[in-house]
Image (cartoon, grey):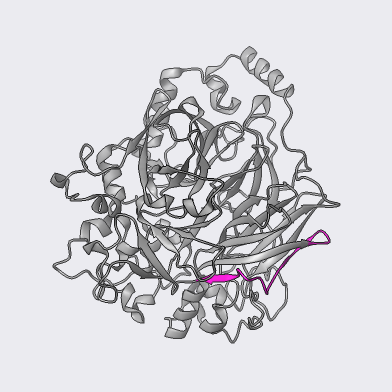
Amino acid sequence: MNERSHPFRTSLLEENEGPGHNPTENATMGEIIAARFSRRGFLKGSLAVSAIAATVSPMALMLADDARAESKSAFIFEEVEAGIDDKHHVAAGYDADILLRWGDGLFPDSPEFDPVNQTPQAQARQFGYNNDYVGYIPIDGSSEHGILVVNHEYTNEHLMFPGIVKVVEGKIEVAPADQKRVDIEMAAHGGTIVEIKKVDGKWQVVKDGKLNRRITANTEIQLTGPVAGHDRVKTKADPSGTKVFGTINNCSGGVTPWGTYITCEENFNGYFTGELPADSKEAANYKRLGIPEATYEWGKFHDRFDLSKEPNEANRFGWVVEIDVNDPLSVPKKRTTMGRFKHEGAASIVSKDGRAVFYLGDDSRFDYVYKFVTAGKFNPDNRAANVDLLDDGTLYVAKFDVDGTIDWLPIVHGTGPLSAENGFNSQADVLIETRRAGDLLGATKMDRPEDIEANGVNGKVYVMLTNNTKRKDDQVDAANPRAKNAFGHIIEIAEDGGDFAATKGKWEILLKCGDPSVADVGASFSTDTTKNGWFGMPDNCSVDADGRLWVATDGNSPKETGRTDGIWAVDTEGGARATSKLFFRVPVGAEMCGPLMLPDMATMMVAVQHPGDGGEDWEGFGRPSYYEDLSTRWPDFKDNMPVRPSVLAITKNGGGKIAV
């Protein structure tokens, strides 16, 4: 696919990967699942009726239905009707208020948003584009006054800028970028840190908040940990190998137990262009990550994104970034101890012995699930003592076994194949090539691992696996139950002893996603799930204070599922397990990001990304969608305003906890 003939979308980066970049013969998750279930025969209630009907007697099914009827869902709300239109929809009895839109001012001196007269300087003082992860850090423990942190993953030029699109044979062609446009894009990436407050039941931005800050693709960032100063991250502009400018493709993230903001670099390969010099030793490393993909044209105007001029620059991206929100002058830090790959997120929880545990997904077909455990212990009474916890610890990669167990394999130099004989001369080499380390350790090849959240209430861990349409038909056998896995699934992990720092555990499937009315799909929602309650492509997720799971999706469409993306409430316990209900849905063309339930459970923050994208594939909107001819003008619905990715605050009419 010609990247300049089509509008850039993260989904296109994933499609351009083809079958994926994992060359190993490591077992895929599909093979593990099928082998396990063929051994077990009857799947002891952890899979829903539709997945086991062929092997369970009618009496057993009746008993299962009776048991389910005795258990109520943990969620109480009137379900939204699934569908597609140009607006957002939330469950009856709730308000979904726009809190921040692309271009909104964050500071007293921020200019008013003017879409036809954008500048890099203005964008750097305004809310960025394509909000993804949303986090909240309370001020003085309050659920009504705090710091909102938001990732800005990428930009859609055809939706952002007037006068750059022409339609040829029904397809969008985007004009080549100039430096001004590139610099605006760079300023629209990164993250936002902004004070917010609930006033008279409604949330508002505090523009004069002393901690307000924008992080962009030009922000100075420090490399820390084993990779800092290594020859493979030194450049002409930075011979020290410690000072990087910018963070990009910030997908999901997290908030640490000590109150710092974590943002993760995902599809960073799309920002690099050019050919490596003949004497570079990075060719295999970059190939494993799909570098260069050259979706963006930044390398035309900024040498650091041109591999022919700065061959090591790409090694300085693909990391987890930690930002101290309490100090707006602090230098963010890329924590290299946590590995380099296409990081989706980094949700954390404290283990039994006080160490911090972070779960990490590498969002690519046939790549891996990881976790990182700090060496030091979290000190809840001394924030300063936690400042560099992320520079020392152990990164693990997951191996899922057919007997329902999971092994967390340490990614440590000198362990097994991670040695000089395989090109790893130090821990820095291991971390720069984390994917290859996982390959050699025999990690399980997954179907696009995205958000992974630990549940402190029930002690489980939930892994979102979005899909993998590149598994071929001729790979289908007893060990591969879902070739062309278009709809994804959710795995539940129980770590040994309920200790999140354990190196062994057990796993189960919570859900196989997709339309349960289509037998060939093999979806496993409970029979209590309505026609509105099923979904495909689980992506982001969160666990609220009561231990309930909320799932956001990416990729639902008329062609695939007959609905837009949204947020579904998913039961994980008792007879209601695997029941799902639609709580919120996005406008046409959008992706659902977030969600985030605040500590008091009276507000849910959600992020609507790239509204109005696509068009020709959307029933009733049968045309390409771009700045001048949009499928929706959400959220302003004004002729002089384009679509604007936005964060919304969902509250119950009259107040109170959500979905109770």
Picture residue at 74% right of the left edge, 53% below the top: 90
Q: Is residue 644 above or below residue 652?
A: below
Q: Is residue 505 magenta?
A: no
Picture residue at 62% right of the left edge, 59% below the top: 607
In the displayed structure image, the side of residue 290 where residue 42 appears, left or right? right
Q: Answer with the quarter of the image where residue 176 lies.
A: bottom left
Residue located farthest toward the bottom when viewing the structure as drawn: 117
Q: Answer with the quarter of the image where residue 66 lies.
A: top right
> What x and y, as percent, mark residue 587?
67, 60
In this rendering, does residue 25 appear at all? no
- Looking at the rendered image, the quarter that the N terminus falls into is bottom left
Picture residue at 40% right of the left edge, 22% below the top: 403
In the displayed structure image, the side of residue 337 where residue 219 appears, left or right? right
In the displayed structure image, the side of residue 334 where residue 307 appears, left or right? left
- Looking at the rendered image, the quarter that the C terminus falls into is top right
Picture residue at 69% right of the left edge, 45% below the top: 582
Q: Nearer the viewer, residue 581 or 453?
A: 453
Q: Nearer the viewer, residue 71 or 414?
A: 414
> What x and y, as percent, mark residue 444?
35, 37
In the displayed structure image, the side of residue 192 where residue 569 appears, left or right? right
Give the residues in magenta.
199-215
Residue located farthest toward the right when viewing the structure as drawn: 654
Q: Nearer the viewer, residue 95 or 328?
A: 328
